[in-house]
């Protein structure tokens, strides 16, 4: 089952050795990082497509939600401007632009934050 909407939270990385931004698909709890917001989102969209395709081929469940604190941060975050989404979104067989709900937070998470 594919989600009707993909909730994606973009936030700055707090971890050394990672790129500047993290894009996190909350529906699958998968992450991508990039040197800027566009790169992080584009890489995440590729990972989402791969996840969908793999799960369909193997009959696996797609949904594996992120921890609730990410959804709470998502609700408080700023929506990605529509114009920016139009610039970075590429055509996809698995994802439609209307399914993307992307928000940007100025507060990052680190691995330590997530393990506590």
Image (spheres, rainbow, N blue to C red):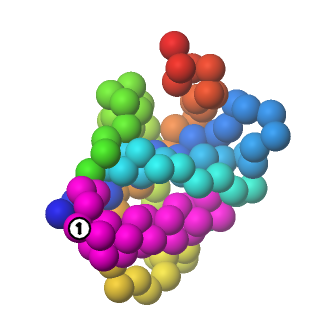
Percent across and percent down for residue 10 are 53, 47
- Give the residue at x 59% y 54%: 32
* 77 is within the stretch colored magenta: no
Residue range highlighted in magenta: 39-62
State the residue in front, 63 or 35: 63
Vertical relation: 2 (above or below) 64 = below
| Any part of residue 61 in sight | yes
Q: Quick check: 84 left or right of 21? A: left
State the residue in front, 85 or 55: 55
- Mark 1 crowdedness (10 Å alpha carbons): few <14, some 14-19, many ≥20: few
- Give the residue at x 58% y 66%: 43
Residue extending farthest right: 17
- Give the residue at x 63% y 28%: 110
State the residue in front, 52 or 86: 52
Vertical relation: 43 (above or below) 14 = below
Percent across and percent down for residue 73 are 41, 31
Vertical relation: 99 (above or below) 22 = below
Residue wearing tag 1? 59
> Label 1's element?
loop
* 42 is within the stretch colored magenta: yes
Q: Main secondary structure of the magenta part?
A: helix
| Any part of residue 76 in sight | no
- Image quadrant in which the N terminus is located: bottom left
Percent across and percent down for residue 50 are 45, 71
Picture quadrant where residue 34 is located: bottom right
Q: Quick check: 18 left or right of 13? A: right
Residue extending farthest top: 116
Percent across and percent down for residue 88 are 55, 74
- Give the residue at x 36% y 50%: 28
Q: How many marks?
A: 1
């Amino acid at each position: 089952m594919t989600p009707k909407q993909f909730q994606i939270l973009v936030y700055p990385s707090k971890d050394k050795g990672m790129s500047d931004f993290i894009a996190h698909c909350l529906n699958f709890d998968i992450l991508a990082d990039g040197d800027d917001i566009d790169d992080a989102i584009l890489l995440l969209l590729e990972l989402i497509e791969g996840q969908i395709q793999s799960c369909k081929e193997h009959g696996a469940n797609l949904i594996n939600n992120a921890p609730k604190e990410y959804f709470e941060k998502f609700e408080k975050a700023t929506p990605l401007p529509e114009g920016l989404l139009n610039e970075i979104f590429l055509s996809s067989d698995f994802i439609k632009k209307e399914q993307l709900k992307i928000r940007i937070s100025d507060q990052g998470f680190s691995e330590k934050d997530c393990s506590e």
